Image (cartoon, grey):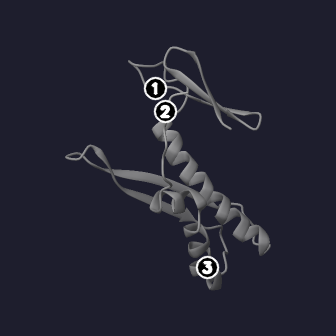
Amino acid sequence: MMEVTFPGGVAVEATFHGHTVRTDQPAPKGDDSAMSPFDLFFASLATCMGFYALRFCQEREIPTEGLGVTLSTQRDEEKKRVAKVVVELRLPEGFPEKYRAAILRAVDLCAVKRHVLEPPEFEIAVV
């Protein structure tokens, strides 16, 4: 079970399996001491996709120097929400052409992305 605590100000921490992730809000609401929960959500998506790209290369003994992922968002100002997530995969120099489509398919299998596209049911209760 993930445990959420409140260390001060508007910072919030989540602890799971002995690991703690801290979040905060940008100024003026918070101290900007950590990513906001919304930014952390996108970081989770980007790092998951990065993991899939990394494992793809490692399993094929493809050097990973230069491998990278960037994620940016495009907002719909009228709806006040993110309308599009743009992920760019930077391949290592000399990456085999025969694997280009396959690594894109692998990155697309990211578990976080799958849960965004097919969200779980949420149940919130007061205990």
Viewed as shown, does residue 27 lie left or right of 62? left
Q: Earlier in the sequence, mark 1 or mark 3?
A: 1
Element marked by disc 1? loop
Viewed as shown, does residue 93 lie left or right of 69? right
Q: Earlier in the sequence, mark 2 or mark 3?
A: 2
Q: Mark 3 packing: few (<14 Cα in 10 Å), some, or many (20+)?
A: few
Q: Earlier in the sequence, mark 2 or mark 1?
A: 1
User: What's the distance in space between the residues labelled 2 and 3, CA to CA?
Assistant: 33 Å
The amino acid type of the residue labelled 3 equals Ala
Q: Mark 1 packing: few (<14 Cα in 10 Å), some, or many (20+)?
A: many
User: What's the distance in space between the residues labelled 1 and 3, CA to CA?
Assistant: 38 Å
Q: Position of residue 9 (x, y in %)?
A: 50, 14
Q: Mark 2 packing: few (<14 Cα in 10 Å), some, or many (20+)?
A: some
Residue found farthest to the bottom: 98
The amino acid type of the residue labelled 1 equals Gln
In this figure, which residue is indicated by the disc labeled 1? 25
Judge depth for marks 1 and 3 and give the one in front.
1
Quadrant in the picture for the C terminus: top right
The amino acid type of the residue labelled 2 equals Ser
Q: Quadrant of residue 59?
A: bottom right
Q: Quadrant of residue 34?
A: top right
The reply to whether the C-beta atoms of the residues labelled 2 and 1 are less than 8 Å apart is: yes
Q: Position of residue 119 (x, y in %)?
A: 47, 57
In this figure, which residue is indicated by the disc labeled 3? 102
31 over 114 or under it: above or below: above
